Image (spheres, helix red, strand yellow):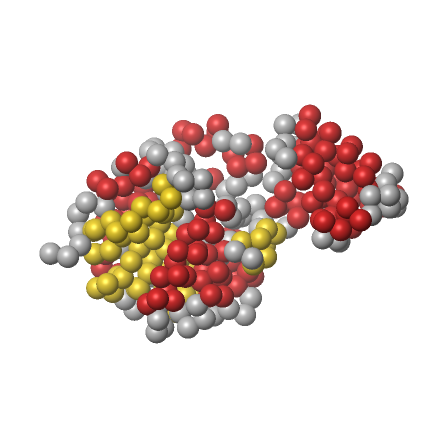
Amino acid sequence: MTVIEAIQRSADFLSRKGVDSPRLQAELLLAHVLQLPRLKLYLQFERPLSDPEVDRLRAFVKRRGEREPLQHILGSTSFCGIEIAVTPDVLIPRPETELLAETAWEYLKKRGGEPVVLDYGTGSGCVAVALAAHCPSAKIHALDISEKTLAVARANAGSHNITFHLGKAFPELPPLDLLVSNPPYIPSGEIASLQPEVARFDPRIALDGGADGLDFYRRIASEALPLLAPDGRIMLEFGDGQETALPEIFARDWTIAEIKPDFAGKPRILIAHRAKN
């Protein structure tokens, strides 16, 4: 079997299984098997595959056809240009969260100095790592409820100076210049109807935002204000349609400075600060 034949057969199989972008997925899996950049496959279409290479590809394609996320099969994903390890213990980072990280590091760079940051519900640590990479002077703290999740985040942190905290309660920290979070925001009753890659493989604890998906926003609105420096900010990712409920949740003691759209033009990032009396 040649490279092009393997791609075509794999893409046909994935298409029958309802996998989005089956040709791209097949190419990424084969590139992983061959340890090549995907685009280099185009220069080797007639290359014959060895039996072990074919067997490994078939095993990967079968897993993908069962709707296991590509990122789990590959073991990592790119986030803001940084390779982030992912496992079933963490939420797979989404492009919308890259916008959250970018918005946060742009704010921190303008703020200057040694800002104190808390990534609330850090998951894979992708946001904390991106902030540490772009703002090395910042004092980054990251909180999560799961020790298994934090183990992945610590591994992703590498040499970056990030302090991790385990638990539900906000840790005792110096006044925060920024609290950033991509909290769980899927309504409990909607999780089962999500794509299989999400409903079956992402950890429920990272998805479930309560009956209406807004439990964590209520908590942040009620508990985060004393943690902030007088001119500190919160930046929160939220789900489709939730922008209509957030102004009421943050009506008391908060001023919403901006609701920023994502790359598709949908409202996605809430930026707020202490209300000025």
- Whether residue 183 appears in this view of the structure is no
Q: In this rendering, would 241 be left or right of 223?
A: right
Count the marks: 0
Task: Find residue 19 and report its horizontal and vertical position in percent.
Answer: 63, 32
Task: Find residue 182 and report its horizontal and vertical position in percent.
Answer: 40, 48
Does 59 appear above or below 142?
Answer: above
Q: Residue furthest left?
A: 277
Q: In this rendering, would 238 be left or right of 95?
A: left
Task: Find residue 44 and report its horizontal and vertical position in percent.
Answer: 82, 47
Residue at 45% x, 71% y is: 136
State the quadrant of the C terminus: bottom left
Q: Residue furthest top?
A: 16
Residue 63's quadrant in the figure?
top right
Does 181 appear above or below 176?
Answer: above
Residue at 52% x, 34% y is: 199
Judging depth in this view, the residue of 244 and 222 nearest the camera is 244
Q: In this rendering, would 239 be left or right of 134?
A: left
Residue at 45% x, 32% y is: 191
Does 31 appear above or below 201?
Answer: below
Task: Find residue 125 and report its horizontal and vertical position in percent.
Answer: 49, 57
Residue at 35% x, 34% y is: 241
State the quadrant of the N terminus: top right
